[in-house]
Amino acid sequence: MSNKTHIILIHGTWCTGKSWGKFVPALEALGLQVHTPTLRYHDLPMDEGAEKVATVSLTDYVDDLSQLLLSLDSPAIILGHSLGGLIAQLLAARHPDKQKGLVLLGPAPMAGIFALYPTMLATFYQHYLQWGFWKKPLYPTKKRVFDYCMNHQPDDLREEFYRGLVAESGRVYAELAFWFLDPNQASKVNTAVLQETPILVVTGTDDKIVVSNVPKATAKKYKRSTYVELQGSDHMYEMGAFMPKTVALIQDWMQKNRLE
């Protein structure tokens, strides 16, 4: 048994548990026990995984991650990036007694948060124009990734990161964009049970895929939230030049909330 604080890192769209790179040892250096699960079917090769992941729900992701959270010997900090930021909230709200804090890096919008901003629409509109988009895989394209996720990352890092990406669930993106039509309300977070949870919300002024108004609206849902804008940052807070700044924010937040 470890006496270190557990932290679960929930990756975003198209990523895997291997996508975190140098962010993992940086968090380990803070004395954290880091867990990097891979979302369902994201560990499969692109073509095989695309067929299987297409109809997976947000609820399925939360089901899988619940098993990890419940297996730990003490409450964990839950960190989510992008889509993982929404999943982190859903997971924490399902098991409020098993978590001790949330870190949300550019979190995707929960049900009820306006998200029809120009660059967000530009990233995904072609997917939504397909008939049956709710059951078709959402593929990473270089334009989507390079222009909207990694707009301030160096070319070599973009290329390396892109090679490790996989397809995402079309159903999940239907649950995000058309939450008002979803009978299961899969993207609706029970924020009431998280009002005493310390929550760090980080955004970037140059984030195009989850523009800062979305994390700002997310932070306003919680009484104990800390909202920080990283000047000049794109969506990839956990890599490149902005990674050390993100780690420093997490360390400071942990100290202030006595979460070490």
Image: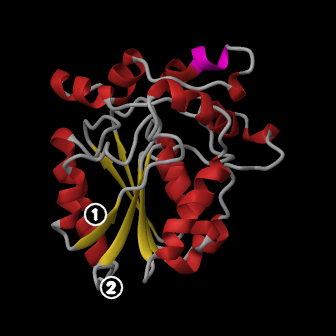
Amino acid type assigned to the residue bearing label 2 in the image: Met
Q: Which disc is residue 250 wearing?
A: 1
Q: Relative to 151, is 2 above or below?
A: below
Name the residue at 56% across, 81% down.
97
Quadrant of image for the C terminus: bottom left
Q: In this view, does 8 lie to the left or right of 151?
A: right
- Viewer-side residue, 123 vs 70: 70
Residue 126 part of the magenta segment: yes
- Measured as percent of width and height from the top left, residue 78 is found at 43, 64
- Measured as percent of width and height from the top left, residue 21 is found at 23, 46
Q: In this view, does 122 lie to the left or right of 191?
A: left
Circle 2: element type = loop
Residue 173 part of the magenta segment: no
Determine which residue is flagged by label 2. 1
Amino acid type assigned to the residue bearing label 1 in the image: Ile
Quadrant of image for the N terminus: bottom left
- Measured as percent of width and height from the top left, residue 154 is found at 17, 26
